[in-house]
Image (cartoon, helix red, strand yellow):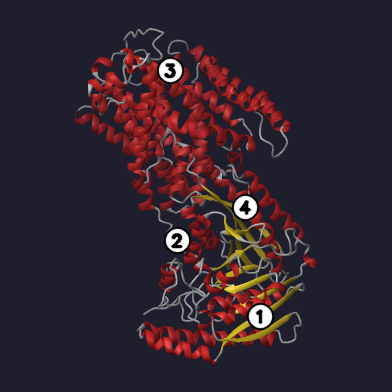
Amino acid sequence: MADANESEDSIVCYAPTMITTNGIWQGDNPLDYSLPLFILQLTLVVVVTRIMVYILRPLRQPRVISEIVGGILLGPSVLGRSKTFANTIFPLRSVMVLETMANVGLLYFLFLVGVEMDISVIKRTGRKSIAIALAGMILPFLFGVGFSFLVSTKGGGISQGISQGTYILFFGVALSVTAFPVLARILAELKLINTELGRVAMSSALINDMCAWVLLALAIALAENQSATLASLWVVLSSVAFVLVCIFIVRPAIAWMIRRTPEGETYSEFYICLILTGVMISGFITDAIGTHSVFGAFVFGLIIPNGPLGVTLIEKLEDFVSGLLLPLYFAISGLRTDVSKIAGATSWVVLGIIIFFSSAGKIAGTLIVSTFYQMPVREGITLGLLMNTKGLVEMIILNVGKDQKVLDDKSFAAMVIVAVFVTAIITPAVTVIYRPARRFIPYKRRTIQRSKPDSEFRLLVCVHTPRNVPTIINLLEASNPTKKSPICVYVLHLVELTGRASAMLIVHNTRKSGRPALNRTQAQSDHIINAFENYEQHAGCVTVQPLTAISPYSTMHEDICNLAEDKRAAFIIIPFHKQQTVDGGMEATNPAFRMINQNVLANSPCSVGILVDRGLNGSTRLAANQVAHHIAVLFFGGPDDREALAYGWRMCEHPGINLTVMRFVPGEEAIDTTAGSTNELGDSRILSIVTDSDKDKQLDEEYVNEFRMKNANDESIVYTEKIVNNGEETVAAIRSIDSSHDLFIVGRGQGMISPLTAGLTDWSECPELGAIGDLLASSDFAATVSVLVVQQYVGVGPQGEGVGTPDSPGDSNDLQFGHMNRRSPPPPPRGYSP
């Protein structure tokens, strides 16, 4: 604030009645009263913070940066330079109310951070994470020790009566800490949270955070008792006693509460109130002991068992605490930061050196350990950068240091700038240095047609809700898992990331152990995972690996495609965005699901099937030997239809499956129409399309003949050819067989020109399913038949052979036309190059 507000020894007097105003009509100025003033301050802080979030979003900065910068803007560095602003909006008398509320917010936020942390991760993390965490603390800590001498001799630094040891401890801890919640947000933003690098970074940050808390408690104990060493010892011992009481008395009491609540029931208001009061009691006890009140709240959060209780507490508190109260704490830090105190070129040079060496210390420490563990140098540097993340714990250390007069204004301002700068450069630097540029894994079996009949068949199955599960399990059983060709299923539960830390903090161990995500879909994850694990136990030759992807819907397809590539899947099954209603119609569940499906179709590294779920033999799963399905493959021609036939072929080897293959052959009239249309268009592209379609016809013929020859004597397979001339006849032919089947498998037919589907696309609701898929999925079609719409992965080679990447030229048209509505002239087929 202005100079008038800067004295540490001011005496502030205010009347206890001046809480609420009598109103402006009585001549009162609302800003003279504490409540209206506090409301104005809170509103201003939240608005400025939100504006900063919006401004810094294109730079991909974590929210903590916006909050600290927002605080600095309101403080004496920028707006507070105006005495009028400082004395009107942030007068000295209001600081007590503001700081009290900010600390209440901080108390509950650190309780939430404790609830979200999974200590069992530390038990599961290997030596690598522990070594990286320690190396990432020791080197910066040693640099901090060196800088503490440098800063204290360069004028300012240590206040009177504070030992050099305490100052070293504060400075060292402030430089060596890693902010776990902020790191989680950065990793999610960079799409690294589910990578090995992300998992190591998260585990190391968790261990680092724990060490930082211990050191912070120690630093506070020493700072508050500069004279009596015995008092410091008592502080440390009583803090240890507090932690032990929490673990051995409070935790069992909370576990008893959880057992008293039936599974699936909500927790009683009484229990929730008890726990929320416990947060304040813990804060009071640790404050009385001599450590900071947030230490008690954090420990109390850690002892809450993972599960529905944690979810309930997070849902009740998260938005209010992190959206409204927490920015106040950063605003307080900003109000205390006066950048003008760092005067003169020397001070800025020293600041630059601190920034460089504190970052370099972490990077060097991490790099040494990562090299020892044979990680690539780039990954080591990236990990070092990520471990430089600063955030809330750093601000708490600095504020406590200022309160205890360990840090003066200059040191405090310098350290805040270090924290902001070091965290701000992480995302851009990591983006430049570490590009896991779609690590291309060369594998050939990207389609069902190309999969060997005697090798493992790998599927990636995406699930939104438990409702998708029964039909998918029946479909997997129908896919004929045998000893010769077992099925490996990766079940991916898709959960939307709602922009809060809670969803992400547990993702790193979700994929390892199949633990359900700790967020509001916990119960759904449990049901889905249990259903598939149960299926795995009862079915032979099937292995299931359940995973959870937590990301925004806009980028979820990246997770799906990356996973399919990492796991070398041949086929992705993803649910259609509409589900069947009680009356047999189809209604959209979530528009975002449709966008995910379109993005997966456009970017997938293997074949994709969209499953329109209308139940497959009822809602219950049958035993393997009881499976009895009538499946129809509708074959028009083209790569997608060949893939559909390949899947049907695999299924028909199952003893309980009856397969009907209906091939649609154009009649004489149909051929005439195509010829006419070709001349009319007169487009140079038509030549390539015609040659492509001729090649496709030849491949179709070969594949169908091979299928017929190998299955000539199989009574469970019926092959028929229907001669049709136009779309109407096609629809009539399909309607004639619809009621006698459980499942239709059809090709998406993207880029194929066929007179047999002419006119069907004019009223198409979902062009991504193709003409026939859209027809079968529409509400006015068969109410009991499920549909699987298949798109074959087409590589770079002339016949879809050779191995292509999702970004390769051969698939560029796929990306281009993935979202196009059909128009005349139609887009060229995938794999077309001019």
Q: What residue type is labelled 3?
A: Ala
Q: In which quarter of the image is residue 332?
A: top left
Name which residue lies at 62% across and 76% down.
Answer: 646
Circles 3, 4 touching at the beta carbon (< 8 Å): no
Q: Where is residue 370 in the image (x, y as percent from the top left)?
A: 47, 48
Distance in Å between CA atoms under marks 1 and 3 = 81 Å
Circles 1, 3 touching at the beta carbon (< 8 Å): no
Name which residue lies at 53% across and 68% down.
Answer: 769
Q: Is residue 102 left or right of residue 91?
A: right
**Which is more N-terminal, label 2 or label 4?**
2
Q: Which of marks 4 and 2 is in front?
A: 4
Q: Which amino acid does label 2 sit on?
A: Arg
**Badge 1 density bin: few <14, some 14–19, many ≥20, Cα 10 Å:** many
Please, is residue 668 above or below residue 490 in the view?
below
Please, is residue 225 above or below residue 265 in the view?
above
Q: Which of marks 1 and 3 is in front?
A: 1
Distance in Å between CA atoms under marks 1 and 2 = 38 Å
Disc 2 is placed on an element classified as loop
Q: In this view, does 794 lie to the left or right of 709?
A: left
Q: Which of marks 3 and 4 is in front?
A: 4
Disc 4 is placed on an element classified as loop
